Image: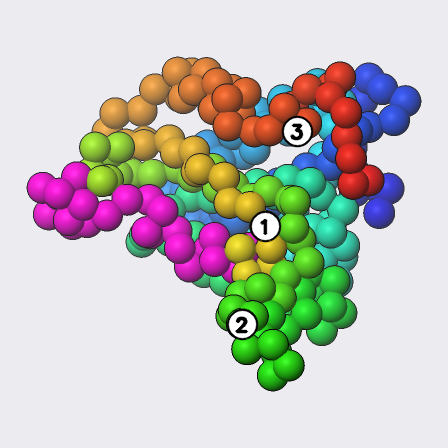
Amino acid sequence: MTSVWKCIGRSACQMKTLIINTHLTYPGWSEGKLNLTFMDFAKTFFIERGHEVAETFVERGYNPEEEVKKHVAASLVILQTPVNWFGAPWIYKKYVDDVFNAGLASKLLLEGDGRTRKDPRRQYGTGGKMQGRKFMISATWNAPRETFNNPESVLFGGKGRDDLFLHITSNYKFCGYDILPDFGVFDIFKNSDIPRALEDYQRYLEKTLPVSLIDRNAVVTGY
């Protein structure tokens, strides 16, 4: 695993972050530069704070068992994704099926769905082993920010991004992860301001993540 984790500036890194890029290339239309920009920004943010960072580019291929190991090693998993037709590109669904099935088979990510005949009080979705780890989505949208959580929205009728991403976050919650609020870059085709969005992303990371994930002087437990 040491070959996939990158750290500079310290003799020993304190935390590990996995960033998964789901971009799917459509030549001449969608080349992936914007999502790569935010992925690289997050990578630099964490490395400068003493983290090790592993990257997965789903489009380039992956080994499911290795991806399970990367998840187990990471304190934080970031999904960097464009929103294509109101979800991540289809290659990400295949990634989820491959990786989470491998994590179930090996019992590294979860062990069953949590229910047991010996204890009927155990709820569906409590079989995960990733408690204490965090998951977040960083997404690029054509949709404007104001279309979400807006009862007057013709399309969403008051629903928010949490509703739209439930099929993604539920996979991680099922495995025991804490789900962090998502970060979004909106209206990228008609009204984009990428420099400002990058500033917003830094503020988001500094405000949203637990101190132990961003402070190089924080006391780290569990590793």
| Residue 157 magenta-highlighted | yes
Tag 3 or tag 2, which sits nearer the N-term?
2
Above or below 100: residue 182: above
Residue at 55% over, 77% down: 120
Q: Earlier in the sequence, mark 2 or mark 1?
A: 2
Amino acid type of the residue tagged 2 in the rendering: Arg
Q: Is residue 146 above or below residue 85?
A: above
The one nearer the camera, 87 or 175, is 175
Query: Real-space Cα distance between discs 2 and 1?
Result: 21 Å
Real-space Cα separation, disc 1 to disc 3, in angstroms: 15 Å
Q: Amino acid at mark 3?
A: Leu
Residue 40 visible? The answer is: no
**Which residue is identified by label 1?**
177
Residue at x 76% of width, y 69% of height = 106
| Three-letter residue code for mark 1 | Tyr
Asked which secondary structure carries label 2, the reply is: loop
Q: Does residue 22 lie above or below 109 as drawn?
A: above
Q: CA distance from mark 2 to mark 3?
A: 33 Å
Q: Which residue is mark 2?
A: 121
Camera-nearest residue between 57 and 164: 164
Q: What is the crowding at mark 3: few (fewer than 14 residues within 10 Å), some, or many (at least 20)?
A: many
Q: What range is drawn magenta here?
A: 150-172
Of the two numbered discs 2 and 3 in the rendering, the one whose residue sits closer to the viewer:
2
Q: Which residue is mark 3?
A: 213
Quadrant showing the C terminus: top right
**Mark 2 in CB contact with mark 3 (< 8 angstroms):** no
